[in-house]
Image: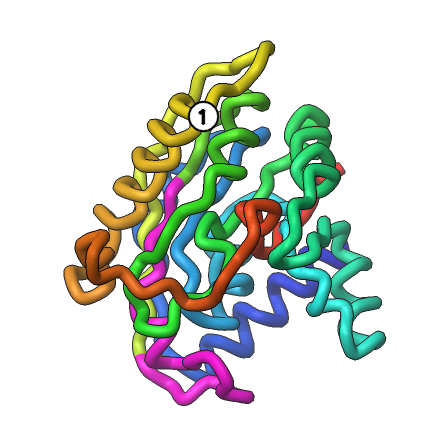
Amino acid sequence: MWYRLNRLFFRVLLARLLEYRIEGAPHEPRPPYLIIANHTSALDDPLVAIAARTRLVYIGKEELMRPWIVGLWIRSLGNIFIRRGEPDRAALEAALRALQRGNAVSVFPEGTRSLDGRVGLFHRGTAWLALRAGVPVLPLGIAGARRAMPKGARWPRGGSIVVRIGPPLHVPKVDGRVTRPMMEEWTERFKQAVIDLLPPDQHSLPASETRLAEPIGAGSAVTGRSRARDA
C-alpha cells in the first residue's frame, strides 16, 4: 500500500509539472525481472516506477539516505543501498536474493547521471546480476528528462519526456562462475538495447570521445532505486 501511494503521488505530481508519456508497456514481463535504463536526471527514478506495472526494488547510492527524513522514507520502500565508488558485492548479492524471491529490480547500469545526456559506460555488475539470476532484462529509454531537470536543479523546469519500454532480453542462468567475457557480451547487449530506444542526440559517442559523468567504482555497477513485489 505504501509503495502504491508513493507511485500515485509521483504520477500526479509529474503530470502537473511536465508532460510525459509511456510507450511499449505491453512488453513488461511478469516478475522476477530486471529493469535497466539510462540515467540523466533525478526524475528517472519516479519515471521508472510509473512505467512499471509492478512494485520494484531499487538499488541506490548511500548518499540518498541524507537527510535522515529522506532516508527514512526511501528505506521504507525496501530499497538496497551501495557506497558509490567502492566495490559492494553485498549489494549485488542482496539484489540477487530479491530476484530469487520473485521481485522486480530496477538498475541504472551507468551508475551515475550523465552530464551531457548521452548514454555512458555500462558497468558489468548488472550483467553479473542478470546472468546469476537468469531473469528477463527489460530495457527502458528515457528521453527528455535531463532537459526537464538537469543535475543540480532543485525542481523540474517543465518540458516533455518519453519513456520507451523495449522488448525483454532473455538471459541464460549461470550457476557457476560468471566470466568476464560473458559479462562484457551482455553488458554491450544491454547498452545497445537502451540506445535503440533513445533519440540520436542521446546515443553514446565513439569510445575515443566518450565523456563519463563521474568516476565510479565497480561496485556502483548497479545503481538506482527499486522496489519490492506486491505481497
Q: Which residue is drawn at 45% across and 25% down?
A: 180
Residue 208 picture location, percent across and down: 20, 56
**Rendered position, 181 above or below 227:** above
Up/down of 214 relative to 174, above or below: below
> What is the basis of the colouring in this image?
rainbow
Q: Is mark 1 on a helix, strand or loop?
A: helix
Instruction: Single out the residue that lies furthest toward the front.
Output: 208
Residue at image point 79% right, 68% down: 71
In-image side of 42 versus 182 (left or right): right
Q: Could you tell me which quadrant the C terminus lies in?
A: top right
Residue 84 pos. (x, y %): 63, 58
**Residue 148 rendering spot, x and y as whole percentages:** 38, 81
Q: Residue at x 69, y 44 (%)?
A: 88
Q: Is residue 3 left or right of residue 56?
A: right
Residue 170: give x, y in percent of width and height. Answer: 39, 23
Residue 82: in magenta span: no
Label 1, on which residue? 180
How many C-alpha atoms fall within 10 Å of the one at disc 1: few (<14), some, or many (≥20)?
A: few
Between 2 and 85, the residue placed more toward the observer is 85
Q: Is residue 173 above or below residue 66?
A: above
**Rendered residue at 32%/82% (across/down):** 159
Specify the quadrant that holds the N terminus.
Answer: bottom right
Amino acid at dot 1: Arg
User: Is residue 133 positioned above or below 83 on the image?
Assistant: above
Residue range in magenta is: 139-159
How many numbered discs? 1
Q: Residue 89 sits in which quadrant?
A: top right
User: Residue 75 vs residue 7: left or right?
Assistant: right
Residue 140 among magenta residues: yes
